[in-house]
């Protein structure tokens, strides 16, 4: 804990303690008074004094706190009125903890005679361990040292605040050494931290799963419901709550002497604060929660990195990078919405801006580590904005409305990430569609194969009837007539001419030659169709199929006077061989015999 700067004085009846505790919370002061012991605590400060005289706590004590100076003054009555306390200027001795002042030697020679008694009294002679915190007197910095420190805060008018509070306020700002880091060094460290914090996975997840984002974009914040004012300045009518009015009365009325550069930076930092605030209001739909202080100060480079901007575009880029790297919802549409909200706030006038600043002040005031930011920035902005001219606010709103922030400005490669992710999503959708179509086709194929298996037994019996119904009756009857003639009266072999082969004679010769193998065929009592199929199979083993006969016989069915006429017509279209059709009703293909070896085939069937 930090030992504050303090001073002691007295009169006849009171001891007066003046303790400097800047940037502390006024609602948390703890006092302990007991005789010569005095203890004071106000986070992060702690003071413990051992007084030269006794004081009492009897209701007459009185305390005041000057917020501007951070000075706490306490008047405590003396136990004995008129007593004079010696050595109040000896601050180091007053900070020394209360303990033994005896001059015992550091090393003692314990003889054997007294060893037993020494052992018995060892615990009694041992002094109690001092658990109290070691304190050092606070030394004020010289003016030369203060000028060497880098400035920050509202209008860059503060320095030395974090020199002793850095350990206590490490959760408030991200700068490791605010006193020794220049503005350029802070900016460079901020950009590096933002690049490390940016998560492409988180960004793409919010990009493609944006149901909650769409709901936040539809939210209408309170400044969007303001009605236009009838005042000539054109500001919207803004009403303040009783708490906000009370807070305004607590502020000290003062003026700020800022040069041109400081004023420019103050305006730009104001835009940065309003961007972070509007984003937080939209992301929580106007209902602040425990994360609100963290969100506001994390999105604002002014609050988290003590940043000073030189242009409005720098403010927008900084806010865009931080809004896509830190909060729960990281979507560029929310960044654009926050810019539009901030423009609306500025166009509504300085009263609307003041109400936003008071809301930020309230959020930070209720948070343990963030209250220091009120003293550095927010309180001064609440006082300063009341004195600025309305036309300055309107001019800033017009400039912000003309400004634009593109994804490429953030230098986070957002367009490349989105293009790559879109390609991956499209490929996955195509693969899913292809897999779905294949599964549907497979299921249809299984059903059709099952139905074809169930009807295969009936297909053979219905083929001839289907052929009769489609105009091939005469051809089928010619074939069947030839089969019946072969069964009852087998034809006799006739000689064939190699010059002008007769298809009918060749067919009769082949059938006569097959008479010798009829014993191996099914009996005549069986169905004639089975006989024709078996005969056709065996004839096909000895002959070859002409490719062009398939083309000629495919789908053609003319009503010739006899089967011989049909085969003759077929053979007339080919000069390479003789066409055979053992089963015209069953198979439309024509079987031919080559002219080179007609007698060898006949000899084989006869033999």
Image: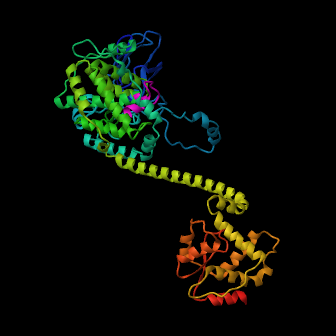
- Residue 273 visible to an observer of this rendering: no
Between 242 and 342, the residue placed more toward the observer is 342
Residue range (magenta): 282-298
Q: Position of residue 560 (x, y in %)?
A: 60, 68
> In what quadrant of the picture does the C terminus appear?
bottom right
Q: Quadrant of residue 255?
A: top left
Please give the count of numbered marks on the rendered protein.
0
Judge left or right: residue 393 versus residue 173: left
Residue 528 location in percent, x, y?
76, 70
Furthest toward the front, the residue is 561
**Going by the image, does 237 lie left or right of 501?**
left
Indicate the quadrant where residue 128 lies: top right
Q: Quadrant of the N terminus?
A: top left
Nearer to the camera, 530 or 490: 490
Tell me: residue 300, above or below residue 432.
above
* The quarter of the displayed image where residue 527 is located: bottom right
- Residue 241 visible in image: yes
The percent position of residue 271, horizontal first and vertical second, equals: 28, 30
Question: Who is closer to the viewer here, 47 or 220?
Answer: 220
Residue 178, horizontal then vertical, whole percent: 31, 38
């Amino acid at each position: 804990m930090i030992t504050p700067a303090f001073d002691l004085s007295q009169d006849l009846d009171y001891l007066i303690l003046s303790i400097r505790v800047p940037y502390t919370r006024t609602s948390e002061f703890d006092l302990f008074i007991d005789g010569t012991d005095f203890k004071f605590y106000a986070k992060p400060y702690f003071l413990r004094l051992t007084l030269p005289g006794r004081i009492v706590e009897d209701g007459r004590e009185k305390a005041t706190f000057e917020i501007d100076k951070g000075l706490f003054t306490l008047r405590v009555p003396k136990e004995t009125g008129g007593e004079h306390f010696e050595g109040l200027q000896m601050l180091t001795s007053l900070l020394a903890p209360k303990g033994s002042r005896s001059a015992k030697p550091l090393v003692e020679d314990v003889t054997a005679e007294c060893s037993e008694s020494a052992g018995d009294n060892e615990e009694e002679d041992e002094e109690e361990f001092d658990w109290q915190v070691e304190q050092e007197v606070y030394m004020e910095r010289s003016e030369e040292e203060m000028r060497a420190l880098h400035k920050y805060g509202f209008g860059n008018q503060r320095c030395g605040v974090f020199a002793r509070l850095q350990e206590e306020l490490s959760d408030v700002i991200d700068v490791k050494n605010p006193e020794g880091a220049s503005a350029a060094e802070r900016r460079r460290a901020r950009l590096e931290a933002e690049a490390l914090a940016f998560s492409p996975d988180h960004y793409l997840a919010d990009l493609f799963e944006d149901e909650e984002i769409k709901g936040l974009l539809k939210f209408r914040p309170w400044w969007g419901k303001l009605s236009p004012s009838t005042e000539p300045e054109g500001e919207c009518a803004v009403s303040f709550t009783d708490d906000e009015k009370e807070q305004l009365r607590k502020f000290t009325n003062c003026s700020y002497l800022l040069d041109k550069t400081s004023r420019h930076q103050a305006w730009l930092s104001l835009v940065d604060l309003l961007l972070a605030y509007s984003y937080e209001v939209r992301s929580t739909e106007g209902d602040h929660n425990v994360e609100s202080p963290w969100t506001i100060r994390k999105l604002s480079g002014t609050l988290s990195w003590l940043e000073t901007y030189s242009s409005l575009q720098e403010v927008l880029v900084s806010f865009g990078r931080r809004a896509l790297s830190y909060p729960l919802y990281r979507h560029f549409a929310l960044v654009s919405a926050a810019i539009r909200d901030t423009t609306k706030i500025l166009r509504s006038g300085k009263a609307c801006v003041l109400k936003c600043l008071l809301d930020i002040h309230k959020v930070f005031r209720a948070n343990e580590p963030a209250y220091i930011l009120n003293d550095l920035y927010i309180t001064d902005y609440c006082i300063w904005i009341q004195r600025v001219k309305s036309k300055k606010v309107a001019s800033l709103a017009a400039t912000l409305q003309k400004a634009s922030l593109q994804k490429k400005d953030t230098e986070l490669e957002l367009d490349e990430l989105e293009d790559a992710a879109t390609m991956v999503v499209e490929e996955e959708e195509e693969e899913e569609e292809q897999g779905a179509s294949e599964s549907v086709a497979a299921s249809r194929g299984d059903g059709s194969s099952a139905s074809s298996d169930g009807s295969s037994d009936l297909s053979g019996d219905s083929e001839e009837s289907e052929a009769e119904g489609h105009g091939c009756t005469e051809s089928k009857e010619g074939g069947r007539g030839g089969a019946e003639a072969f069964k009852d009266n087998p034809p006799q072999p006739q000689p064939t001419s190699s010059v002008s082969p007769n298809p009918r004679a060749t067919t009769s010769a082949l059938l006569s030659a097959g008479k010798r193998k009829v014993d191996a065929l099914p009996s005549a009592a069986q169905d004639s169709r089975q006989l024709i199929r078996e005969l056709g199979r065996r004839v096909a083993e000895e002959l070859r199929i002409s490719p062009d006969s398939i083309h000629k016989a495919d789908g053609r069915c003319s009503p010739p006077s006899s089967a011989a006429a049909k085969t003759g017509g077929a053979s007339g279209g080919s000069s390479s061989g003789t066409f055979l059709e053992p089963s015209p009703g069953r198979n439309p293909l024509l079987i031919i015999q080559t002219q080179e070896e007609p007698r060898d085939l006949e000899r084989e069937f006869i033999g």
